[in-house]
Image: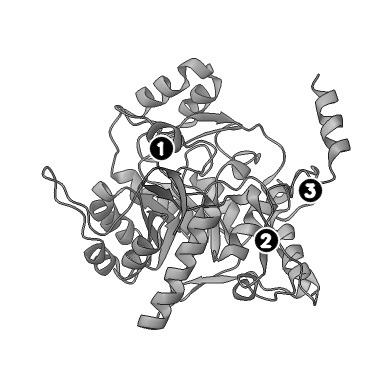
Amino acid sequence: MGEWIGRGRKARRSYGFDEVAIVPGSVTIDPEDTDISWKINDQLIDLPIMAAAMDGVVSPNFAIEFSKFGGLAILNLEGVWTRYEDPSDILAEIAQATPQKATELVQRLYEPPIQEKFIGERIEQIKRAGAKAIVSAIPQRAERFGALAKEAGVDIFVMQSTVSTVRHESSRVEALDIAKLVRAMDPVPVLVGNCVTYETTLELMETGAAGVLIGIGPGAACTTRGVLGVGVPQVTATADAAAARDQHLKMKGRYVPIITDGGMSAGGDICKAIATGADAVIVGSAFAKAEEAPGHGFHWGMATPHLNLPRGTRVHVGTTGSLRNILIGPAHLDDGTQNLIGAIKTCMGYVGARTIREFQQAEMVIAPAIKSEGKIFQQTQHIGMHA
């Protein structure tokens, strides 16, 4: 299986969003007749798009605003919102830093210790506004922060790291028992990630996790692939994870959603992720562009503050419109970065899919030239504008 990349060495071909396309169906459906909801355990979620746990994207206020549209915005429990009582000046300082100093500044500003009292306060702030509270922590702090979050009434907990596995070996520290964490958090659902393979997805589902996050290094602000060379393109990673989800359902009778995390900058990418098998997606850069985002048009990866080996960078995306414009329109840009929900529903209409599950069955083709075929005049105009 795979192609030869050298004598005695094979590699499996994998695909990213720019290399595939979705085939229209033989029957089309009115986009308004489509249902894009999905479930985490018994919780019905209206939108299949979640906002990433990045400090430049999600604040407590952003999470509240996002929930008004029926979506989930993940608050990072290890970011500025649990280190500072009011991080407004900190966020402004990061936005104003030069590119050369940005990572060093982020590292310094994340040195103050996390104050555990802020965990409950942030969750309670979100809950008081009538929104669902969803928060994230890395494995090393998941048990402690999970317990505090549960006590504060959190709705969903995310245990997230660059690469997550059930079997972690270390001579220095005791590995997190994910199944034990899931049991301790009950009835709060636990999402775990990230991973990119069939085997790991299946093993993570067997811990009782309520969902698995798919994607290593594809995000705009993540430099893991450049720093470590690790990752699998998102289309292949999602398809493999979807196969694991379906196998788990067959074996255990329990449906565990997979959530493609990162690498989607426009509606077309999100559509391809769902058509490939995702139940939902996590997006960062698209929402960093919202007027309501706390990053002032910037965002940075969760691993950017790492003192020894930062695997993220600060990215300038600008501010292009309101959260409403980006989620449900009206779109003022023609590049697919606004009215993301409209894009999903319209694509489902073209495919003839009434639900997310039906959308996951859409035919797909390998199409590396799909974005450039017949677009010579657009390309010429683009070059002329920037000459």
Q: Amino acid at mark 1?
A: Gly
Residue 94 image position (x, y, % from top left): 49, 24
Q: Residues within 10 Å of mark 3 (few under 14, many from 20)?
A: some
| Image-based side of 257 in relation to 321, left or right | left
Q: CA distance from mark 3 to mark 2?
A: 28 Å
Q: Nearer the viewer, mark 2 or mark 1?
A: 2
- Label 1: few (<14), some (14–19) or many (≥20) C-alpha neighbours in 10 Å: few
The numbered mark at residue 15 is: none
The image shows residue 294, relative to residue 89, as above or below, that is below
Q: Nearer the viewer, residue 22 or 151?
A: 22
Percent from the top left, x then y, of residue 360? 60, 70
**Residue 114 appears in the rendering:** yes
How is the rendered protein coloured? one colour
Which secondary structure, mark 2? strand
Residue at which label 3 appears: 331
Residue at the image position 52 percent from the left and 19 percent from the top: 99
Q: Which mark is residue 365?
A: 2
- Tell me if residue 13 comes above or below residue 356 in the rendering: above
The one nearer the camera, 41 or 197, is 197
Task: Give the foreground label among 3 and 1.
Answer: 1
Give the residue pinned by disc 1: 229
What kind of residue is marked 3?
A: Ala
Q: Secondary structure at mark 3?
A: loop
Residue 51 visible, this angle: no
Query: What is the three-letter code of the residue carrying label 2?
Result: Val
The disc, 3 or 2, on the residue closer to the chain's N-terminal end is 3
